Amino acid sequence: MSRRNLDLSKIHIAKKDLGLDDETYRALLVRVAGVRSAKDLSPRQAGKVLAEFERLGWKPSPVKTGRKAPVAAAGRAKLIGKIEAFLSEANRSWAYADGMAQRMFKVERVEWLDPEQLRKMVAALAYDAKRHGRAAQ
């Protein structure tokens, strides 16, 4: 989703959460950004409108951080643990690891990898850590 669409979605969610009728909402847009429709907002204007909604008491919902670590069979649990450690050290999510699995092996999720594929992923993450100056366990 593009940044523009994300901002427009947030604006419309805030409008609904604050219980603004259409007339009040459009008056706010005119007062804050000088436009009558959210589709006419520039990125900077959208930020100002969102800041105004927050000033009026709207609290954006927290961003979902991803998913829990995959559950693996005993033989693969150590490798999953190593992958989790590398991700944590690099401040990356499991979605990143799933993306690696997709690119490297054409498998959607890490927990579906076989032990050999998991070893290759650990090696790739170790190489990445070394390249970025992090401890490669």
Image (cartoon, rainbow, N blue to C red):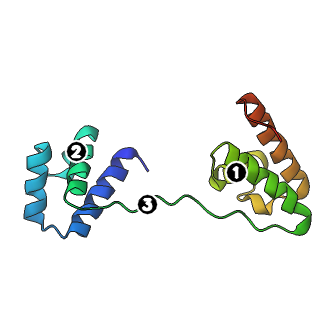
Estimate the x, y position of residue 111 in percent, counting from the top left: 77, 62
**Residue 48, numbered label:** 2
**Residue 37, numbered label:** none
**Residue 62, numbered label:** 3
Secondary structure, mark 1, is helix
Kind of residue indicated by mark 2: Lys
Estimate the x, y position of residue 98 in percent, counting from the top left: 69, 54
Q: Nearer the viewer, residue 36 or 73?
A: 73
Estimate the x, y position of residue 103 in percent, counting from the top left: 72, 46
Q: Nearer the viewer, mark 1 or mark 3?
A: 3
Q: Are marks 2 and 3 in contact (CB under 8 Å)?
A: no
Mark 3 surroundings within 10 Å by alpha-carbon count, few (fewer than 14), some (14 through 19), many (20 or more) = few
Q: As displayed, is residue 30 above or below residue 77?
A: above
Q: Is residue 45 visible?
A: yes
Mark 2 surroundings within 10 Å by alpha-carbon count, few (fewer than 14), some (14 through 19), many (20 or more) = some
Kind of residue indicated by mark 1: Ala
Q: Are marks 2 and 1 in contact (CB under 8 Å)?
A: no
Q: As displayed, is residue 123 above or below residue 14?
A: above
Q: Quadrant of the C terminus?
A: top right
Kind of residue indicated by mark 3: Pro
The tag earlier along the polypeptide, 1 or 3, is: 3
Is residue 79 toward the left or the right of residue 41 in the image?
A: right
Cα separation between marks 2 and 1: 35 Å
**Residue 97, numbered label:** 1
Q: Nearer the viewer, residue 99 or 32?
A: 32
Residue at 81% across / 46% down in the picture? 121
Is residue 15 toward the left or the right of residue 30 in the image?
A: right
Cα separation between marks 1 and 3: 22 Å
Q: Are marks 1 and 3 in contact (CB under 8 Å)?
A: no
The picture quadrant where one finds residue 40 is top left
